[in-house]
Each structure stands twice: as C-alpha cells, then as structure tokens.
Image (cartoon, rainbow, N blue to C red):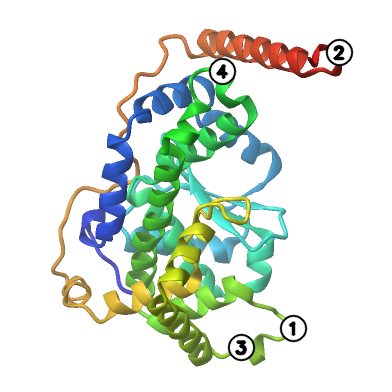
Amino acid sequence: MPSYPGISCEAFRHPLDREAEQALRNFPGFDLIARRFVEFLYERPQYIFLMGNSIQVGPRQYASIYQIFRECTRDLDIYPEPGLFVSQNPQVNSYALGKERPYVVLNAGLLDLMSADEIRTILAHELAHIKCGHTILLQMAIWAMNAASILGEMTFGIGNLVSSGLIFAFYEWRRKAELTCDRAALLVTDDLNLVMQTMMRLAGGSNQYAHELNLKEFIRQSEEYHSLDLDGLNQVYKFLLYNGAQGAMLSHPFPVDRLKYLQEWANSEEYRQIRQGNYRRSPAEGAVNVEVQTPKSEVDRLRQQIDELQQEINRIRTQQSPGNTP
C-alpha cells in the first residue's frame, strides 16, 4: 500500500470542505457554541464511556484489524497513534472523535459486513477526520444539536441558534468534510473501485446476497441520480432531503453523490501528483485548534456547570408539568 510521509491534510482537502468550515467559523454564534462545548461536555466523558463499554483494539485484541489500523496511520502520517475501539452495535457505522485523545470507533455490525480491504478503506476515511482536525468540530456539531433539541430557546442562548442557521452551517460542513476523507481513503488504498464498492455496501450491502451486488450498476445509478438535476424541482427536493425534510438533517452526502466527487478527483492531475510524491508537506497532524480556553479548575467548574444545568432542566420540567399548564 502507498504511504505519504509528511503529507499535509491540505494536500488532499476538498475545496468545498475548506469553504464550508470557514463559513461555519465565521457564522454568528460559533464562538458561543465553542465555549459552551468546552464547559459542559469536553471529550473525557466519551472516552471513559468507550473504555468501559467497548473493546479497545490492540496487538492482542482484534489483532488483524489493529494491524490494518497501524498501516493506515503510517500511510497518512498521523502521530501519535489514535485509539481504536469496537462497539457492540449492529448498525453498519463508524466514526472518529476526540482532540486530546482522538479515537476511531467501528461498530460490530460493520465488521460483520465488510472485507478486510473494505475495513482498510473505512479506517483510512475515519483517520482522515483526525488528520484534518475534523473531530472537535464534529463533537461540537453533535453537542450543539442535542443541546438545542433538549433545552430549546429557554437556556444558555443555544436554542435560538437553530433558527439562526448555525446548525445548518454545522451540517453543511459535516457533509463536505466527508468528501475530503473519501479522498484519503482513495490515497491509502490506491483502488477507486474498492472505495466505490465500500460505499455501495454501506448504502445497502448484505452478506447473504453479496454475490448479487454489481458495482457497474451502482455507478450507473449514480449517473442517473445526477441526471435528475436537469429538473430544477428535483434540485429543490435534494436540498430539502439533506436539510431535514424527513425529520433529520443528513450528516453525510448520499453515497451516489460521493461517487461522483471521488471519480472526478481520481482522474485529476492533483491526485496523480500526490501519487507521484509531489504534495504539500507538514509535521504529523492529528488535531484541530479551536480557540477556546479550558477552565482553570476542570473538576470544580464541571460540577458547577452540571448543577446549573440540572437546576435549569428541573425548572423547565416544572413549567411544563400538567398542573402548570395555562
């Protein structure tokens, strides 16, 4: 497998990812989200949960997966080595989070569906989130949506950010960030068909009927999907589907969308130059810098904020109880 010593994430970063992140950081309210995120829900609780409720992958635990993981960190020049966990979850999914202790999580359902080569593709994709510094922003996006949903407009000035569009900006960036990580998966595997095959299996793969899947047909489906844009109304429907028309905003582009972007890059001069070793370099990467200050006394501060949060939740529950309904 090819390796890219010293490669910078900017060497393969998708321009739509770069533009969407800049728009997000410039959006009114982003600084508030950053402060509240650090104060209320720093990454330590998630790490403790994984250590207590998942399997930590290593040389003597899922050893073959760990070997693939180490090769991917080497190929993308990520240092220090992030953590890797397997979670007992049947959903075919994976994700990367964390800043001080970045980590990748693979669901058991994904391991049961994917081949070793496809797992390599997925690990390279998730490690690219760490390489590019996406993980802290991903955590902030998840927290912001949950906080807005639970507490609404009555608390901490978070709820009104939904209507202001900040949540939409987070999700727009999240979708564009996936395009960058697909590029990293292609760089590591050097196999466009493998990456597209992995996307097909994520879209609707089955172990029992795997022999009946046809990548050429999936590529044809992607082309047919994009031809729908000839009708302007279809473009409107696509926008609505991405942005909550069915009840939830989508965090990932449709797989058929990702195929198109990846095929274009695989045929580009930029990709060929990187494969030849001509790429932008930087020291090993693995974290993004969000300009916020960590509380001086983390434990005391966290206890105080939890108490305040619980008091506010109790107040809301009291107001919403049947006896207090006007």
**Image quarter (top left, top right, bottom left or bottom right) of the C terminus:** top right
- Residue named by callout 2: 323
- The residue drawn where x is 71% and y is 86% is 209
- Sooner in the amino-acid sequence: mark 1 or mark 2: 1
- Sooner in the amino-acid sequence: mark 3 or mark 4: 4
For residue 67, above or below residue 87: below
Q: CA distance from mark 1 to mark 4?
A: 49 Å
- The residue drawn where x is 45% and y is 79% is 228
- Expressed as whole percent of the image width and height from the top left, the position of residue 236 reads 45, 64
Q: Is residue 139 visible?
A: yes
Label 4 environment density (alpha carbons within 10 Å; few <14, some 14–19, many ≥20): some
Q: Amino acid at mark 1?
A: Gln
For residue 10, above or below residue 99: below
Verify CB contact (< 8 Å) between mark 3 and mark 2: no
Q: CA distance from mark 3 to mark 2?
A: 58 Å
- For the residue labelled by badge 3, is the local secondary structure a helix, a strand or a loop? loop
- Residue named by callout 3: 213
- Sooner in the amino-acid sequence: mark 1 or mark 4: 4
Say whether residue 276 is left or right of residue 61: left
- Sooner in the amino-acid sequence: mark 3 or mark 1: 1
- Expressed as whole percent of the image width and height from the top left, the position of residue 253 reads 46, 63
- For the residue labelled by badge 2, is the local secondary structure a helix, a strand or a loop? helix
Q: CA distance from mark 4 to mark 2?
A: 22 Å
Label 1 environment density (alpha carbons within 10 Å; few <14, some 14–19, many ≥20): few
- Residue named by callout 1: 208
